Structure formats: structure tokens, C-alpha cells
């Protein structure tokens, strides 16, 4: 759906994005980075609000800048609100449906459909001025889905949603993705993105650090020791059984004496050896965890590399 080849965007002497090459297809893709990493600039390039300074970016095979053919197949939820505050949520969405060219009857029916999809039916009659941040996010998503787009871009959509609202919002996005939609979600909240997708684009200071599945990206940084904690009633026996496993960098007992903490260089091989110790040697393991098996750790390693 989206193909970027060596795309850069400069604001005078300031870098927005620098030499970005990537592809975005159907399903949910997360665009990750700290504030100022270039996420919004990349989204504005994809939505045709900006032209690349250098490089080529296409959406559905077309250049998106000022291109209605692209806009007809794209939905967009900007990070910043820009509502007619005196409108109700329903009136606002219906008004945008009419601007899209729908008949009055079609605009009314489609408005009711998308408002129901985002869980706002009971509150759609209230004025937007009285909406919470989470309700505003839902109405933004509703308007983005009006014309049944193939690609939906959401800039920080989880901001302001309570935990239940976030879960419902993610379930809705998964449903859209299962129906073949392409969804690009910009976020800096790493643990929430992990629950949404494993397809990632990691931006830092305008540059694309890594792309692909979280597991694949994690394998790129295996030069960093992988930390693993084993909770067991037999930490010393666990140490004896695992001491001969190759690529263990360090091994120690935690302060409680009820866990073994290790650093390993080839986690996949280590987990195989641990499984054998549990199954063949009868090692009792109460818990197994790793602070490096999460997106935040991966991002930290890539940024500091």
C-alpha cells in the first residue's frame, strides 16, 4: 500500500525524516519513536500533506501529494483535534460524510454505522465541546472510516483512552485488519503497541532504525546479552544443570536465594537447553521471565547502539 524509497524531508536546517525506506501493507503496522522522532512528518508525507525533499513515496502506486485518487482510499486521524465544538458527534460525522459527496440518506445511515462501530451510539447526540479526550478519539476514528478506506492512519490514537477504552479500540483495529485494511498506528507507548501488533517501524531522530517483526528485530541485537530470570526452589541445582550450556555470559543467585539470574548470547539455544533440563532432569521451575523480551528493551538497545 505504501512504498517509501530513500525519503527525506527537511524543514530548513531541521531534519524531519532522513533517508527512510520501507513498505507498509495490509494489517496493523506500528510506527514507533520518541517525541520528535519524525513519526508525524512521515504520516504527513503518506497523507499527502507534505512533499518529500528527496526520495520517492507512493501510496497505492501513486504520489499522494494533493492527489484525490489517493485520498478516496485513505482515512486519517490526526493527533491534534480540530472539531466544530458546537456540533454533536453525530452531526460532525454526518457533515463530513456530506462533504465526501454522500447523499443525505447515505450520510445518515453510514454515520450511524461508524458511530456504532466505535462505541459512541449512546453519546453521539452530545455536543463535542463536552466530550472527554477518549470520546474525541473515537469520533475521529469514526470520521476516518466513513468512506470505507483501504488504508487508515492514526497519529497517537490511544492518548486519553482509559484501559477499557484502549482494549475496545485495539479490538476494533484488529477487526479492521482482519478484513484486509492497512492500519498505520503512530505511538510512543511501547507496551501498548506490543498488545496490538508485532509489525514495527522504529524511528529515531528522523532515521529508520529497524523494520519488521519484533522477534526478527530482537535477533538483530543479540550481541547484547539476553537477561533471563528463573524462579525455582532449587536454584543451585538449576545452576549445575545449566552451567555447561554454551554462550552463558554470567550466572548469579538473586538476593532472596530463590531465583537464578543469567545473561546469555543465544537465547533460542538456551531455552531449548532449559526445556531439556526441566523435562529430562525433573527441574522444578515456578517462573520464567526476561526483561529483554519486550519492545521497550529492544528500542533501548537500538537507540543506544
Image (tube, grey):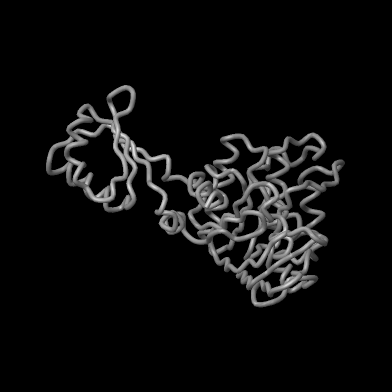
Position above or below: 166 against 155: above
Position above or below: 136 against 5: above
Asked whether 33 or 155 is in front, the reply is: 33
Q: Which residue is painted at 31% across and 45% down in the image?
A: 249
Asked whether 16 or 45 is in front, the reply is: 16
The image quarter containing residue 158 is top right
x then y, percent, for residue 151: 63, 63
Outermost residue on the top side: it is 256
Q: Which residue is painted at 27% across and 48% down in the image?
A: 271
Q: Which residue is painted at 78% across and 64% down in the image?
A: 49
Position above or below: 210 against 88: below
x then y, percent, for residue 227: 37, 41
Q: Which residue is painted at 57% across and 63% down in the image?
A: 181
x then y, percent, for residue 119: 63, 43
Outermost residue on the front side: it is 249
Quadrant containing the N terminus is: bottom right
The image quarter containing residue 86 is top right
Number of marks present in the image shown: 0
x then y, percent, for residue 222: 40, 54
Position above or below: 29 against 82: below
Q: Is 63 left or right of 269, judged from the image as shown? A: right
Q: Is 227 left or right of 270, judged from the image as shown? A: right
Amino acid at each position: 500500500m505504501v512504498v517509501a524509497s530513500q525519503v527525506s524531508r527537511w524543514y530548513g536546517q531541521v531534519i524531519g525524516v532522513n533517508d527512510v525506506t520501507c513498505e507498509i501493507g495490509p494489517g496493523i503496522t506500528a510506527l514507533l519513536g520518541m517525541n520528535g522522532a519524525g513519526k508525524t512528518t512521515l504520516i504527513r508525507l503518506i497523507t499527502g500533506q507534505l512533499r518529500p525533499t528527496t526520495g520517492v513515496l507512493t501510496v497505492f502506486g501513486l504520489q499522494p501529494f494533493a492527489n484525490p485518487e489517493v485520498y478516496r482510499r485513505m482515512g486519517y486521524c490526526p493527533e491534534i483535534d480540530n472539531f466544530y465544538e458546537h456540533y454533536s458527534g453525530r452531526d460532525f460525522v454526518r457533515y463530513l460524510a456530506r462533504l465526501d459527496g454522500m447523499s443525505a440518506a447515505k450520510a445518515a445511515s453510514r454515520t450511524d454505522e461508524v458511530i456504532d462501530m466505535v462505541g459512541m451510539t449512546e453519546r453521539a447526540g452530545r455536543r463535542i465541546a463536552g466530550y472527554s479526550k477518549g470520546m474525541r478519539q473515537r469520533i475521529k476514528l469514526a470520521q476516518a472510516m466513513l468512506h470505507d478506506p483501504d488504508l487508515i492512519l492514526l497519529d497517537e490514537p490511544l492518548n486519553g483512552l482509559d484501559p477499557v477504552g484502549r482494549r475496545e479500540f485495539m479490538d476494533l483495529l484488529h477487526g479492521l485488519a482482519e478484513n484486509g485494511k492497512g492500519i498505520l498506528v503512530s505511538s510512543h507507548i511501547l507496551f501498548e503497541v506490543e498488545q496490538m501488533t508485532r509489525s514495527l517501524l522504529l524511528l529515531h531522530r528522523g532515521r529508520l532504525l529497524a523494520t519488521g517483526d519484533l522477534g526478527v528485530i530482537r535477533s538483530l541485537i543479540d550481541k547484547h546479552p539476553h537477561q533471563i530470570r528463573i524462579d525455582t526452589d532449587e536454584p543451585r541445582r538449576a545452576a549445575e544443570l545449566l552451567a555447561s550450556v554454551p554462550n552463558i555470559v554470567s550466572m548469579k543467585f538473586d538476593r532472596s536465594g530463590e531465583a537464578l539470574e543469567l545473561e546469555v548470547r543465544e537465547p533460542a539455544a538456551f531455552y531449548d537447553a532449559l526445556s531439556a533440563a526441566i523435562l529430562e532432569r525433573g527441574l522444578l521451575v515456578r517462573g520464567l521471565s526476561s526483561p529483554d523480551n519486550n519492545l521497550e528493551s529492544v528500542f533501548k538497545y537500538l537507540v543506544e547502539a
